[in-house]
Amino acid sequence: MRRTADRGFNHRQAMTEEWFRTHVLPHVSGVRFLPYQVRQIRHEHLPAMLRDEDRKSLADIAGDLVKVSARWRCLPFHYFRYGGYRRGMTVERACSYMPESALFHRFLPRVNRDTVDLDDKTSCKKILASAGIPQPH
């Protein structure tokens, strides 16, 4: 009889953990992620873009940012990291790159936590590649 009660508790605990991981944690961790992204863009990515002679016009960059933001429903910090501002990068290609915020705060929390080890970049890259998700080299 005790094993049945324990199994019920374990199931309820697992369901509570799953709900917390998929509904609460993405919102909390997303807020903590923003200052990091702002710091990276200000100190690294914007200066690199401003020095790049092969960048698009500011109007084209602004248009791209609107489209990438609409595609992923988040601030497009990855646009600068992956060189979306360069003339050779189409907006379609820029939209094909998954932003870190979407990966870490929207998709991976919904994946079984025992399946994806975030510390193992090689495993994560293989899983994303097998799902057909384009990634930067």
Image (spheres, helix red, strand yellow):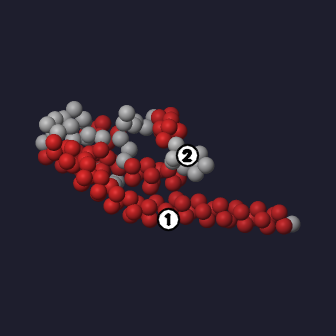
| Residue 113 percent location from the top left of the image | 58, 51
The residue tagged 2 is 116
Dot 1: what SS? helix
Q: Amino acid at mark 2?
A: Val
User: If you read the primary sequence from the N terminus, does the residue marked by circle 1 or circle 2 appear first?
Assistant: 1
Label 1 sits on what residue type? Val
- In-image side of 41 versus 55 (left or right): right
Residue 61 visible in the snapshot: no
Q: Position of residue 26 (x, y in %)?
A: 46, 60
Mark number for residue 24?
1
Q: Are marks 1 and 2 in contact (CB under 8 Å)?
A: no
Around disc 2, counting alpha carbons within 10 Å, would you say few (fewer than 14), some (14 to 19), or many (20 or more)? Answer: some
Q: Residue 85 lies in what quarter of the image?
A: top left
Instruction: Return the residue found at the far front.
Output: 43
Which quadrant holds the C terminus? top left
Residue drawn at point x = 39 percent, y = 49 percent: 100
* Numbered mark located on residue 43 in the image: none
Where is residue 78 shown, x and y percent of the image? 32, 47
Which residue is at 24% across, 36% downward? 90
Answer above or below: position of 33 versus 98: below
